[in-house]
Image (cartoon, rainbow, N blue to C red):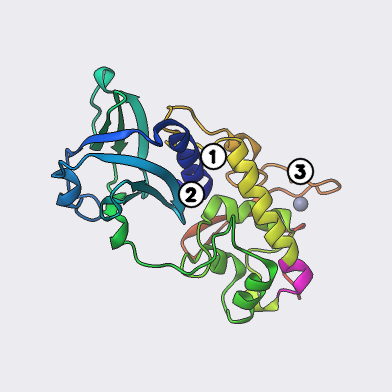
Amino acid sequence: MPELPEVETCVRYLSSQITNDSIIHQYAFRKDLRFPIPEVLLNSDKPLVLTSVQRRHKYLVFQTSSSDMDFVIHLGMSGVLRLVPTDEISRKKHDHYQIDFKSGRSLILNDPRRFGAVLLLSQLKPNSAPCALNELTPANLQALCSQSNQPIKSLLLNQQKISGLGNIYVCEALYLAQISPHQHACALKYPQIRALVFAIKLVLKKALLYGGTSIRDFKSPDQSLGYFQHHLWVYNQEGKTCRRARCSQEIKRHIQANRSTFFCASCQKPAP
Ligand SMILES: [Zn+2]
């Protein structure tokens, strides 16, 4: 599933490529994604200049010269965007949505599982949860932890509380901060919370540096793969030896709240 670093990777690439380009036409080959694609986008004959591409939580936000036509794309579970010359498009199975630009390029959303979405920006519900990359601080994580009776891993994955963290990056950050994924959030001490926020940002920034994580099918819109999967400490590393100095434990995998949790039981001991 594309997570925050993958969405940010897409945004940075698209922003460098299509800002100030003009949208000629938008097509849907299949309108029933997670939500129906708004007809107003598909039927518009208004000339639209794309003024910016930004990220809001896990949405790509496309702002245009006509604010009522600003729209967002969510990649859902399996969405992949590709930016290609319009006259070289080879249509693929699961291509559902296409934007043609005046520069002779097209942006195509391919989404086999159709949990992705194309919506007007005005349809987006406000989400006040702090973004894990830009807004999370030790103070606001401490406030969230003190009100939670969940394990820290569940709290970090709750998008209503903290926006943008998925399973891969939560496992990695908890390992780096040496916190057990089973530890109750409310039992964490402030130095642990500070270390955890530092670890979360480190992991996300490192993932961005490597262009995201391509475990299943993530590709940037220029078709390049992410490389962070080669730099994971615990995620998908079950049975391998912990890489922390002076630790010889094997990385374990547990099922926690129906998700795989990877951790080192020696380096990430829960508090007694
Ligand atoms: Zn270890």
Residue 243 in view, yes or no: yes
Viewport quadrant of the C terminus: bottom right
187 displayed left or right of 6: right
Residue 243 marker:
3
Residue with the mark numbered 1: 212
Tag 2: amino acid: Glu
Residue 184 in view, yes or no: no
Q: Is residue 204 above or below residue 177?
A: above
Spatial distance from mark 3 to mark 2, Cα to Cα?
A: 25 Å
Mark 3 close to ligand 1, CB under 8 Å? yes
Q: Is residue 252 above or below residue 51?
A: below
**Earlier residue among tags 1 and 3:** 1
Spatial distance from mark 1 to mark 3, Cα to Cα?
A: 21 Å
137 displayed left or right of 94: right
Instruction: Depth check: give the residue in front, 44 or 109.
Output: 44
Tag 3: amino acid: Arg
Residue 195 coordinates in the image, percent (x, y): 75, 61
**Earlier residue among tags 1 and 2:** 2
What secondary structure is the stretch in magenta mostly built from? helix
In the structure shown, which secondary structural element does the residue marked by tag 2 occupy? Answer: loop
Q: Residues at badges 1 and 2 in contact (C-beta under 8 Å)?
A: yes
Name the residue at 30% across, 34% down: 22
Residue with the mark numbered 2: 3
**Which portion, as a residue range, is magenta?**
188-193
153 displayed left or right of 23: right
Q: Is residue 23 above or below residue 267?
A: above
Total marks shown come to: 3
Q: Does 142 lie within the magenta span?
A: no
Mark in front: 3 vs 2 = 2
Q: Residues at badges 3 and 2 in contact (C-beta under 8 Å)?
A: no
